[in-house]
Amino acid sequence: MFKRLVRKRLEQYSGNITLIRFHIEDLDFENRRIKGDSLIKKNGQIYQEKQETFSLPTVIYLQCYVEPEVVEKIEQLIDQKVFNSFIFDKWECWKLLHQDEELSPYLPYTQKLENEITLQQSLFVYKDVFLKPLNPSHGHSSKGIFRVKWQPGGRVQVTYRKEEEIQTISFDSYEEFHDWISPRLPENYIIQQSIQTKTWHQKVTDLRLNMNKNGEGKWEVSLLLLRVASNDSHIAEKVLAAHPMKNLIKVFPGDTDMDNIEEIVNNLGFKICNSLDKSGHHMADLGIDLGIDENGGVWIFEINPLPHPLKGVLDPSWARPIEYAVYLSLIYRENNYEDQQNL
């Protein structure tokens, strides 16, 4: 999948460039070299070279989780020109954004699942919650996510994904539910308040916002879509339909809540990116999931530091990371030239 992703990015990039695709364990710190295979784009054609050893590149775009101490070691080698270097989990992200006074009102209640009491209290208060795995390498594809609803009479309903199917199961009591869910939570989880988003023909909706740093080093909105799920739960990753924001009037005719939604969401996107910049993390490619509740309020659900550009739509975020990498590389060359002139 990663090989296809790199090639697709090259196809969408308009210039000439050489990319080196490599695994992090193939980086030789001592000799400042890496083992990988190069892909060259020249005059619209892509050529793939055999695997060989290269000198360390001027810019590295991380596409997987790497231990923070390893990232720091790489940054020291190439003057911190490593981007998307903070592969945060959902709890780290929520805590970071919650510290920002401008962003915290847009965040649903979220708590780390520490014990049974935490879950029971959250369920009793909010009646409808999500259990999401912290692991940043999954959980962005519905894997391991449970939606739990408190129902009249003390019953508990759970919706979750099993292989490619969505399953719903009900329990007569909280105790029965707890006995069932406990062995199915083998890793760290968060509890997040469920937000009832606007529906389209009884299907729930959400917003996908792709933010990227461009060839001038500035954040921009690459893509903003309203997505309609294939059922009535955000558990499913399948999208029934995706609409550009300009079509909201047609999707929700007469709904005045939608008048300024695009401006509000775009502003939120820039605030999120600026908040990450202020934190000192070098990010340049983000996928942000948001929702609009039934009263027109906007909520930030999660931020994906390993986003995959969307298929079937015009999505500039395919090529933006390469454009930003070229921008960083040019800065490196200019600074290096000036240093040589000063010697």
Image: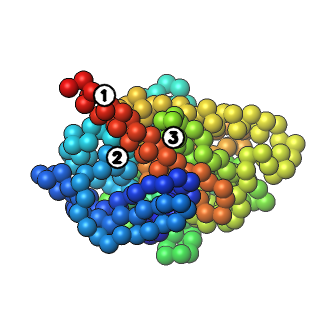
**How would you rate the neighbour count of disc 1 (Cα within 10 Å): few for under 14, some for 14-19, many for 20 or more?**
few
Q: Is residue 44 left or right of residue 227?
A: left
Please provide percent x and percent y for residue 305. Answer: 43, 49
Viewer-proximal residue among 208 and 173 = 208
SS at mark 1 in the image: helix
Q: Residue at x 69, y 33 (%)?
A: 263
- Report the Cα–Cα distance between label 1 and label 3: 21 Å
Screen quadrant of the N terminus: bottom left
* Relative vertical location of residue 153 with respect to residue 191 in this rendering, above or below: below
Label drawn at residue 338: 1
**In this figure, which residue is indicated by the disc labeled 2?**
59
In the image, taking residue 324 as reference, residue 235 lies left or right, namely: right
User: What amino acid type should be assigned to the residue bearing mark 2?
Assistant: Val
* Mark 3, residue position: 215
Q: Nearer the viewer, mark 1 or mark 3?
A: 1
Q: Which mark is residue 285?
A: none
Q: Secondary structure at mark 3?
A: loop
Q: For the residue labelled by badge 2, is the local secondary structure a helix, a strand or a loop?
A: loop
Q: Amino acid at mark 1?
A: Glu
